[in-house]
Image: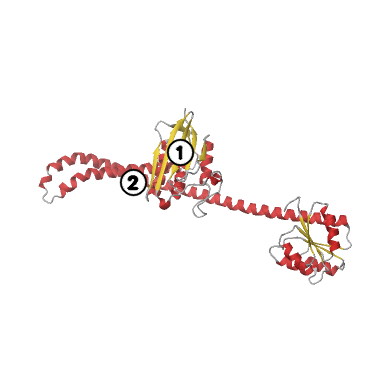
Amino acid sequence: MSLEKQTILVIDDEQLNRKLLRAQLSVMGYVIWEAASGSEALEIAKEKPDLILLDVMMPNMDGFEVCRLLKESEATRGIPVIYLSAIRDAKSKVHGLALGGVDYVSKPYDGPELLARVKTHLTLRRQEEELSLYAGKLEQMVQERTQQLVHADRLATIGTFAAAIVHEVNNPLTSIGGGAELLKLFWNEAEPLLDRHMNEDQTGKLAKGLPRVGGYLEGILEGQRRIAQIVNTLRTYSQRGETGMAPCLLADPANDAVRLVQHRCKHGVSIDISIPDELRISCNRRKISQIFINLFTNAIDAMPDQRGTIHVDAVPANCYVNIKIKDSGCGIPDAMSETIFDPFFTTKGEERGTGLGLYIVRNIIEEHGGKIRLAPYDGAGAEFHIELPLLQ
C-alpha cells in the first residue's frame, strides 16, 4: 500500500454521488475507483483498493450483500468498508457493522467529518499491514535464529563426540604404535636368522611370507601415524574455547582440512595442495582450517557423482598471500557472486545445507584482515580467491 497513492473504491448507483465523492477525495491525493453496481464492485475489489466507500441502497444487490460477499472472499476480506447511507436506524447500522463494515456514515454527511473518518481508517489499514509485515519478518527471524541454534547445537555435539573419540582412541592407538615399533625392531633382528633357515621349510610358506612381513609392519605404522594425525586434528576441533592468534605455516590448516574431509573423497575426489612451505601467517589455526573445510565440502557437493578435482595454490604478493581454490564442479553463476556470502543463502536445500558456510568463511577471513571473492564463472567449476596478510 502506497502512502502517497492510496486507492479508494466508491460504490454508488448514483453517478452524481460518485462524482461528488471523487471531487472531495481527489484533492487529498487519493486515487479514486468507481463502481455503479454491486456486481461491478466485486470485480473491481479484486484489485484490492485500500478502502471502500459503499452505498447501502442499490438495486439488484444492496450494500449489505456486497459487504457480506467481500468478507467471504480471502482476497478482499481485509479491505475496510465504510457504509454511506440515508438509512439511519440503529438496527441497520448494527447489521452492517456485524457483516464486517468498519464504519457507518449517514447521508447527508459532513465533508470534513467524512474525510477525517477516511483518513483514520486508511491509517489503521496501513498500520495493520505494517504490523502484519513485521509479524512475518519476526516469524522469519525466529526461524532463522532457530536454525542458527540448531546449527550451533550440532557443532557443540560434534565437538563433544570429537573429544570423546580422541580420549577413547588415543590410548589404544599409542599401544598399537608402540607395539608395531617393537615388532619392527624385533623383525630387524629376526629376519636375517629366518632367512638363513628358509631352505629348511619344506612347505615353502616361510619363503613366500618372509619378504612381506617388513611391508606389513611398515603399513601398520603408516596407518597408525595417519590415525594419530586425524586424532590430533580432532583434538583441536573439540576445544570449546577460542584459541588466539599465533604464527602458523599456511599449509598446516589446509592439510588439517584435507584430513577431515578425506572420507568425502573416496568416490574419486582428489585435493591438490600447492602451498610453499615458507608461507607463514598469524592466525587462529582452527578457524583457518574451517575456511578450507567449508570450501572443500561445497566443492565436493557441487561435483557430479562426487568425482573431480580441487586445486589449492598460494603465492606471496607484497605483504599478502593470494590463495586460489578451484574445483571442477558445476560452478556458480556470476549473478550469485555476492549473495552466496549472505547468511542462510543456499542452493543445496534445507536438508543438505544451512546457508551459513560461506557466510562463516567470509567472517573468518575478514577477522584475519583478509578478503574473499568469487572469480567470474568460466564454465569450468568455481574459483575462490582469498587474500590474507603474511607474517613478516
Residue 80 image offset from top left, x and y in percent: 76, 60
Examine the rendered structure and indicate whether residue 203 appears above or below residue 44: above
Residue 133 visible in the picture: yes
Crowd class of label 1 (few under 14; some 14 to 19; many from 20; radius 10 Å): many
Three-letter amino acid code at the position of disc 2? Pro
Question: Which tag, 1 or 2, sits closer to the chain's start?
Answer: 2
Dot 2, crowdedness within 10 Å: few (<14), some or many (≥20)?
few
Question: Does residue 159 appear in this view?
Answer: no
The residue sitting at 46% across, 36% down in the picture is: 323
Depth check, front residue: 7 or 174: 7
Q: Secondary structure at mark 1?
A: strand
The residue lying toward the viewer, choosing from 153 and 50, is 50
| Residue occupying the point 13% across, 50% down | 204
Q: How many marks?
A: 2
Q: Amino acid at mark 1?
A: Lys
Closer to viewer: mark 1 or mark 2: 1
x and y, in percent, of residue 152 in the image? 52, 48
Q: Circle 2 sits on which residue?
A: 172
State the residue in front, 46 or 293. 46
The secondary element bearing badge 2 is classed as helix
How far across and down, in percent of the image, does residue 187 sit?
Answer: 21, 41
Q: Which residue is mark 1?
A: 324
Q: Is residue 345 left or right of residue 61?
A: left
C-alpha gap between disc 1 and disc 2: 39 Å
Identify which residue, 324 or 284, lies in the foreground.
Answer: 324
**Apparent side of residue 353 relative to residue 143 in the rendered image (left or right):** left
Figure quadrant of residue 256: top left
| For residue 333, side relative to residue 77 (left or right) | left
